[in-house]
Image (cartoon, rainbow, N blue to C red):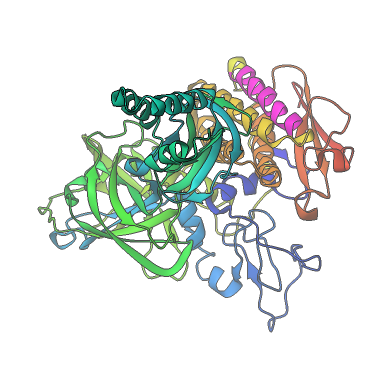
Amino acid sequence: MKKLSYIIPIVTALIGLFLGYLIFSSKTGNEDNHVHTETENSNTQIWTCSMHPQIRQNEPGSCPICGMDLIPLAAASSSNSNPYIFEMTEDAVKLANIQTIIVGDANNTFSGSLKLNGKIQVNETEAASLVAHLPGRIERLFVSFTGEEINKGDRIATIYSPELVAAQRELLEAKKLITISPEILQAAKNKLKYWKVDDKFIDKVLDTETIIENFTIYSDQSGVVMLKKVTVGDYVKLGDVLFNLQNLDKLWVQFDVYESDLSKISLGAEIEFSTPSISNKTFNAKIAFIEPTINAATRVAIVRAEVNNSSKLLKPEMFVSGLIKSTQTTKSASSITIPKSAVLYTGERSVVYLKIPNTNIPSYEFKEISLGEAKGDSYEVKKGLENGDEVVVYGAFVIDAAAQLNNQASMMNRNIKVSSVVENSLPDYTKDTPSEFKTQLEDLTLAYLNIKDALVASNSSLTAKQAGQFSIKLKAVDMLLLKGNAHTFWMGLQELMNSHIVEISSLNDLEKQRSQFDFLSQALITSLKVYGVEEGAYYIQHCPMANKNNGADWISKELSIKNPYFGDAMLSCGQTQDTIDENY
């Protein structure tokens, strides 16, 4: 085991960050965020982190390790003494998307309802494109930025079109021949109408006998600008897209449903849902679509409802929690079965997590079970569960990994003692890690260094682009090269890195990218230490002023300091704290 050399216990934070990472709340310069090691006065309210119980503060705030909201010590200590029970905050449960089911016949019903998690999405049927109906040069834009809302009939641009000018000349010449050949005038009008030039424009040209050089384009749709594809001075051809619009008055709300629960859902069923972004308000919608296929990797199907959003309260990508009343009943079963996704395999005796009912803090109990035969996508449980137990079917691995790093009972730490103390240490898999895996990990690190360089240059768009390349490299790492605990530990690190690299690639705010880069760096540093490198050296560098003076690390191939958290503002702020090479 290798002792960490950092003030903040990186390894304890890794999986906890995935479960409980929230946007850091604002902190004043006078906040006292240090860890208390002395016995606190019994008359003082102590606040702690449910993910990191070593944190102690005299006032509420955020955990300096993972950013989760602190809770009163009295609430946190209600079951902390039991190493087989792991506690999480409500926010952590939502972020980790923990899902449960009640097993057994349970009075022949599924508790009368089904809880679902999902997201708000745009309604694809309400998307539209505003296109150029005549060729020309954009002289002026009345829509200036992405996200701007426009209504049908609003001006969107003016265009200079030589073809339109020529067509107006033809119209005026045709007017002179109206007594001889009126059909020529009508043909000239039709040519303009083909370009969607309205009658008012045509009549104005005929009445004034003046050619109008700049033509105003009006929107024939209402919505929010999702993509702006032109700027002033651009020359557009007939049919070129100017703007992509999305009407947000009607939205989709999509839920993930396990295949075992699909029989409890039908088209037209009403679902009630809420979102953490809008407190104390619920919404209602009806199921309009059930995906005809099952995702082979996650074993879930998408269920979609349509919701009216004329109030504009809901926004795409919001997380939601739904409750659908189940009208289906289940037949009594002679044995208990659970989905395969609920099981953490350790041999014949495997592990599940049970949600403990009626607790102030969401709590999950480590439970060993004996499995029987596989039945499709489920297992028969021979021993360990009872009818009515609420079993985690999605997110069990995340809970287990966090419990392990908090030195509680877990799949890899089954003989825990109550008196055990959390140690700031990492497993050492360097000798058992194949060279091929180390090489892939070094390729991943090179992709990381490109992200670091983009942040040094304070280039948010390049940072997002390089994050996309890192994501490709991360997917290319073959975890099957690792065995046993090394394989399991990597799964947690991979999930963690993936969650933060997705954020970096989707953001265009440089400071938010840097915040996510901090967490990505911690995970990759741990990966290099745990699995080792094949050749060369990597330097772990630290800036004490980054992350609101909490400090942050990064990886470099050079001893010279180039700070990715400040760029040119404080390029040389920091120092080299450690070196990872083949002899580490």
Q: From this view, report whether residue 246 is shown above or below residue 44.
A: above
Q: Which quadrant would the N terminus be assigned to in this image?
A: top right
Res 414 visible: no
Q: Residue 578 lies in what quarter of the image? A: top right
Residue 438 shown in magenta: yes
In front of the other: 277 or 55:
277
Residue 510 lies left or right of residue 70; in this view the side is right
Q: Which residue shows up at 55% across the image and 38% down it?
A: 158
Q: Position of residue 325 (x, y in %)?
A: 21, 61
Which stretch did the figure color magenta?
A: 437-454
Q: Which quadrant would the C terminus be assigned to in this image?
A: top right
Q: From this view, report whether residue 358 is shown above or below residue 168.
A: below
Residue 444 shown in magenta: yes
Res 147 visible: yes
Secondary structure of the magenta portion, mostly? helix
Q: Position of residue 275 (x, y in %)?
A: 43, 60
Residue 139 lies left or right of residue 270; in this view the side is right
Residue at the bottom extreme, as displayed: 43
Residue 384 lies left or right of residue 395; in this view the side is left
Residue at the front extreme, as displayed: 179
Q: Residue 229 lies in what quarter of the image? A: top right
In front of the other: 254 or 384:
254
In front of the other: 500 or 507:
507
Q: Which residue shows up at 83% across the image and 44% down it?
A: 543
Q: Which residue shows up at 31% across the image and 23% down it?
A: 180
Q: From this view, report whether residue 238 is shown above or below residue 198.
A: above
Q: How many marks?
A: 0
Q: Position of residue 384 (x, y in %)?
A: 30, 51
Q: Position of residue 450 (x, y in %)?
A: 71, 26
Q: Which residue shows up at 53% across the image and 21% down it?
A: 476
